[in-house]
Amino acid sequence: MGQQHGQHKGRAAAGVAAAGLMALATACAGDGAAASDDPAAADPVGTVRAAPDALVRAGSSKARTAMEMASGGTRVTVTGRGGYDFRRRVGRLDVVLPEDPAGSSAGRRPPVTELLAGGDLYMKNRGAGVPADKWVRIETASLSDGNLVTGGATDPFAAAELLRGAGEVTYVERTRIDGVDVRHYRGVVDLARAVRAASKEHRPALGAAVEKGFSKSGVPFDAYLDGRGRLREVRHRFQVNDATVVSTTSLYGYGTPVAVRLPKDADLFAGKIAER
């Protein structure tokens, strides 16, 4: 990107890490498949771990995200919608926050636009003192959770790459999502294993999550794959201190082109982000 990025990212990363969007809103591989004649039960671990590669073969898709945080009797939900290019490792999401920390949907803020670019996260309409026409850029590896939770939406490919660390996987059943026949698998991600197997773009961020982000290294998941092994939905349950965060990523419209244009240096915000 340019030398000016290096000048911006220190202050911007620290500010965003301290006041992430969620804060604003509020195993070794084991084959656990039950005996079944269904071919989908033959190798649940291998099938789930191969899901990220199927996405790369697919090229791109539309995406919906939902992140629900429950802590101290309060439940907050953040939603997003956009698309992702799995070959280029870039995507765009418009993330909608509830208006107040109690989770009220009455009178929402304008969506926060997020550009996901491998190890970088760009946010526009961020609030907290950032001008509406400026972008904030941070390195996801600088965030304690690797941006699996902080941005209010898990990077769709990072969500898939977590499955490279899947273990204790059970084939549950065949079902349908959005009119598509899918196979439902359930298991637990070993984060350390996922880091070792992740792509170079996401390995540093996932490594940060292992080192300092989560109170438990095992992340339970439910994954729904279509007949080509592509994810149609994946749901992870993270434990962050005393809060449980459930992140759901839904993928559809495979092959839909995704246009992502990263901001220029002049469009980046270099000031201090207000803390809330």
Image (cartoon, rainbow, N blue to C red):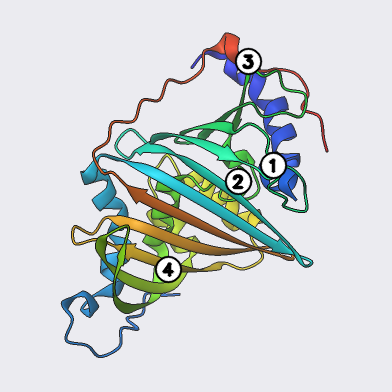
Q: Which residue is mark 4?
A: 222
Label 3 environment density (alpha carbons within 10 Å; few <14, some 14–19, many ≥20): few
| Distance (Cα) linking label 3 and label 4 | 38 Å
Picture coordinates of residue 51 (x, y %)?
29, 57
Q: CA distance from mark 2 to mark 1?
A: 8 Å
- Quadrant of the image containing the C terminus: top right
| Amino acid of disc 2 | Gly
Q: Residue at x 63, y 39 (%)?
A: 142
User: Label 2 crowding class (10 Å Cα cut-off): few <14, some 14-19, many 20+?
Assistant: many
- Looking at marks 3 and 2 on the same chain, the residue that comes earlier in the sequence is marked by 3
Residue underneath mark 1: 20
Of the image marks 1 and 3, the number of the one nearer the N terminus: 1
Q: Position of residue 210 (x, y in %)?
A: 58, 57
The residue at which mark 3 appears reads as 133
Residue 197 versus residue 187 in the image, above or below: above
As shown in the figure, which amino acid type bears the numbered disc 3?
Asp
Label for residue 125?
Answer: none
Evaluate if marks 1 and 3 touch, with contact meaning CB atoms under 8 Å apart. no
For the residues bearing labels 3 and 4, Cβ distance under 8 angstroms:
no
* Cβ–Cβ under 8 Å for marks 2 and 1: yes
Tell me: 252 left or right of 102: left
* Residue in front for this viewpoint, 151 or 137: 151
